[in-house]
Image (spheres, rainbow, N blue to C red):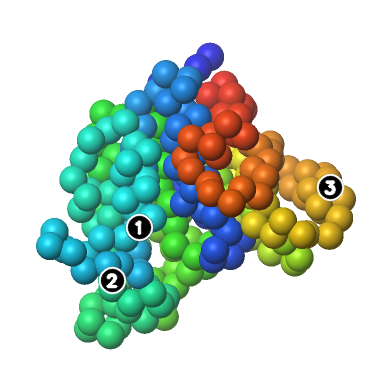
Amino acid sequence: MNISRYSAFVTGTDTDVGKTVVTAGLLKAFEKEGYTTLGLKPVSAGCEVTDDGLRNEDALLLQAASTEAVRYETVNPVAYEPAIAPHIAAMEKGKLLTASGLEGYVRGAMLKPAKVKLIEGAGGWFTPLSYRETLADLVQKLQVPVILVVGMRLGCINHSLLTFTAIQKSGLKVSGWVANRVDPDMSHYKENFETLEQMMDAPCLGEVPYLEEKSAVSVSEHLDVSCLINGH
């Protein structure tokens, strides 16, 4: 049976592993299957000052890749200018990031009619919101499955297994993972991929090759969301 609605949190094995472009690609893959979509980036750091306010490149990409037309602030409600860890940026502003606060923003956005909603994190699974909470606490509050983006480069096996285990220990399900090749010269790519495939009990949604210019559409061509649609 095809899904009526689907929401998931997209995390990565580290920063700079291509979470955003893979999330945008997944939105386009769902759109190809006939689903309306909405991408969310609850918190971002590394924003540009514009006439319209702070704007984050990743959040703008998700907004553009979504079929649901919403205000920027719906996609990215919490934005900081410096490209540093969000909790540090918040502290510099005298603000406190909380999982419950972000949950409120996300749940409001999830009332939008789009059938597929993907929530992209910042950095990795345990990116801090404060000294007491991490983004993992937000996902536990939302109780949505997780999609893991693996940056295929040296060290990815350890990072992937650590993240996969941490997600499971949080009581959450990894509904799929994506191998995103970020190092074109990675040694023994095939063997690394096969190791991850054998050691992570979740379907691989696709292998994204190294591309000089990655776009939502070009990435979507390497993704298969059928197992998510069919509820497996």
Q: Which residue is mark 3?
A: 190
- Residue drawn at x 48%, y 43% is 215
**In-front residue for pair 228/79:** 79
Farthest top residue?
A: 1
Q: Please, which residue is most extreme toward the front here?
A: 212
Residue 229 versus residue 140 in the image, above or below: above
Viewer can see residue 230: yes
Give the residue type at disc 1: Glu
Image quadrant where residue 140 sits: bottom left
Specify the amino acid type for callout 3. Answer: Lys
Gap between marks 2 and 1 measured at Cα:
12 Å
Q: Give percent across and percent down for residue 35.
A: 40, 23
| Three-letter code for the amino acid on which mark 2 is drawn | Tyr
Q: Which mark is residue 57?
A: 1
- Crowding around mark 3 (Cα neighbors within 10 Å: few <14, some 14 to 19, many 20+) is few
Q: Please, what secondary structure does the residue beneath circle 1 have?
A: helix
Residue 143 placed where, x, y %? Answer: 44, 46
Q: Is 46 positioned to the left or the right of 20 in the image? A: left
* Nearer-the-camera pick, 168 or 74: 74
Labelled disc at residue 80: 2
Q: Nearer the viewer, mark 2 or mark 1?
A: 1
Give the left or right position of residue 16, taking residue 24 as reference. Answer: right
> Disc 2 versus disc 3: distance between alpha carbons?
39 Å
The vertical placement of 97 against 230, above or below, is below
Residue at 48% in and 20% down: 33
226 left or right, relative to 53: right
The vertical placement of 83 against 75, above or below, is below
Residue 85, quarter of the rendered image: bottom left
Dot placed on the residue nearer the N-terminal end, 3 or 1? 1
Which structural element holds mark 3?
helix
Residue at 27 percent of width and 67 percent of height: 48
